[in-house]
Image (tube, rainbow, N blue to C red):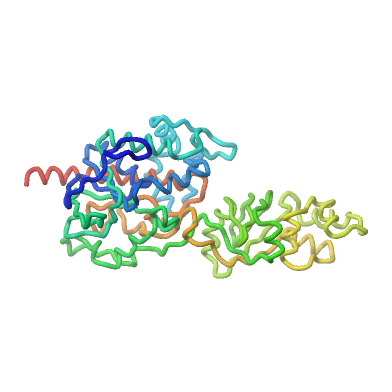
């Protein structure tokens, strides 16, 4: 027995070989959700993770309050997953936001809905939820095996590297839930993608099935990430860390209203994160800001014309439109302020800033890319390898912040775990009669 987050849970045996009904590889939200539903189906479940402890990225998310899900009407909620929405819809239907909140209640975790519609635990952190969840899984018979890095297959056995050497695990079914490629120091380093370039994930004794190859993957890309902009040194020194509120943002055809924060290398915040897909779709993306979204171009021009000409441009902006501080600074980042009210109004309503790119994937909240959805059947089982399922951020779907990411990780994990448990039932029956 070992204590994990203060609770006794069953942790790895030292033997070089073991067997279970369902092996779950990855101890994040998707993996633990898979373990829960597979166990509920009657399977003996073991969870393996390369890190020394489970749920590290979940705990990191808890530092900002742990946004669990969102309370918007369900049709709009499901549509947030864009191109992947039709594929994910059955899983979300089976575990919608209301079910997630009920699940939290079952763990003794009270939730509330914030003014933006986002749902959080009352404690505003992840550790109580993770502690209760691990304890419940352990009580149900799930075993946990940290410091087990998945290396592929050895015949039909799962192969892991451990501090004690190689370990082989026989399992009736397997759920892959190894995450994307953001925050690699927390465990989701994306190195599993290299397995698709080897024979490690080739089909088992079935010539009719095509082997998995690198083409089965979409390249990883940062999602819900900040952007990089080449600010001037004076602008950075004065405004880094300042929020820019009540603006309309546009990249390509995508338009939204919100706020963001100036960083030393660019900008970040929920409004910026939501523009990620549009930014990735363009070779030379440009961020267009409307600094006065509640006024028309004509109204802005008229207000500037009516301001006393004796005033400086800074005072005219402040008096006429209440534009000052960081917004005034942004206007000047595009060059000297125009002399005429019409030209200045045009800049205020459509300030263009060249985007150098998205911030590094290692600090992105999540990643786009991963295992292509057409590689999976409706059970989330790999078409090329029967009995192997996948869930969570390993899959090529993308979601905005606001609780959508965590909800889908849990929903896909539960779905894969349920089907893995059913599949393992076949294996257990065959194993008993062999």
Q: Residue furthest bottom?
A: 283
Residue at 38 percent of width and 39 percent of height: 5
Q: Position of residue 14 (x, y in %)?
A: 20, 48
Q: Position of residue 105 (x, y in %)?
A: 42, 30
Residue at 32 percent of width and 34 percent of height: 136
* Nearer to me, 285 or 145: 145
Q: Position of residue 235 (x, y in %)?
A: 70, 62
What is the tally of numbered marks visible in this picture?
Answer: 0
* Nearer to me, 402 or 250: 402
Q: Position of residue 278 (x, y in %)?
A: 54, 60
* Nearer to me, 130 or 53: 53
235 in relation to 114, above or below? below
Q: Which quadrant: the N terminus?
A: top left
Position of residue 47 in the picture relative to residue 90 (left or right) = left
Q: Residue furthest left?
A: 434
Residue at 58 percent of width and 63 percent of height: 228
Residue 193 position by quadrant:
bottom left
337 in relation to 365, above or below? below
Residue 135 position by quadrant:
top left
């Amino acid at each position: 027995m070992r204590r994990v987050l203060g609770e006794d849970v069953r942790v790895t045996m030292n033997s070089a070989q073991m067997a279970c009904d369902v092996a779950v590889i990855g101890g994040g939200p998707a993996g633990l959700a898979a373990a829960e539903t597979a166990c509920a189906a009657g399977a003996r479940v073991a969870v393996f993770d390369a890190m020394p402890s489970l749920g590290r990225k979940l705990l990191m998310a808890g530092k900002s309050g742990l946004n669990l899900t969102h309370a918007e009407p369900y049709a709009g909620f499901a549509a947030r997953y864009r191109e992947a929405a039709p594929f994910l819809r059955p899983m979300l239907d089976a575990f919608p936001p209301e079910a997630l909140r009920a699940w939290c209640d079952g763990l003794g975790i009270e939730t509330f809905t914030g003014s933006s519609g986002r749902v959080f635990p009352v404690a505003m952190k992840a550790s109580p939820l993770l502690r209760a969840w691990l304890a419940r899984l352990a009580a149900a018979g799930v075993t946990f095996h940290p410091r087990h890095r998945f290396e592929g297959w050895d015949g039909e056995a799962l192969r892991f590297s451990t501090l004690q050497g190689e370990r082989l695990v026989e399992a009736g079914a397997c759920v892959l839930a190894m995450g994307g490629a953001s925050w690699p120091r927390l465990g989701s380093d994306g190195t599993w993608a290299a397995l698709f370039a080897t024979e490690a994930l080739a089909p088992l004794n079935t010539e009719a099935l095509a082997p998995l190859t690198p083409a089965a993957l979409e390249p990883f890309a940062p999602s819900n990430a900040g952007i990089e902009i080449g600010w001037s040194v004076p602008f950075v020194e004065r405004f880094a860390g300042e929020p820019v509120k009540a603006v309309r943002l546009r990249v390509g055809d995508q338009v939204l209203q919100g706020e963001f924060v100036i960083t030393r290398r660019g900008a970040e915040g929920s409004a910026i994160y939501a523009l990620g897909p549009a930014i990735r779709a363009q070779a030379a993306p440009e961020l267009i800001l409307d600094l006065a979204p509640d006024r028309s171009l004509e109204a802005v021009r008229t207000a500037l014309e009516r301001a006393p000409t004796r005033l400086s441009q800074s005072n005219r902006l402040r008096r006429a439109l209440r534009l000052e501080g960081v917004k005034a600074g942004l206007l000047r980042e595009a060059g000297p302020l125009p002399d005429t009210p019409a030209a200045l109004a045009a800049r205020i309503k459509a300030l263009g800033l060249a985007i150098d790119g998205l911030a590094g994937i290692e600090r992105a909240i999540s990643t786009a890319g991963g295992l292509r959805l057409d590689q999976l059947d409706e059970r989330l089982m790999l078409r090329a390898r029967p009995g192997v399922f996948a869930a969570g951020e390993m899959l090529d779907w993308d979601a905005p912040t606001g609780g959508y990411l965590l909800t889908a990780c849990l929903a896909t994990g539960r779905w894969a775990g349920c089907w893995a448990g059913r599949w393992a039932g076949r294996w257990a029956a065959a194993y008993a009669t062999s």
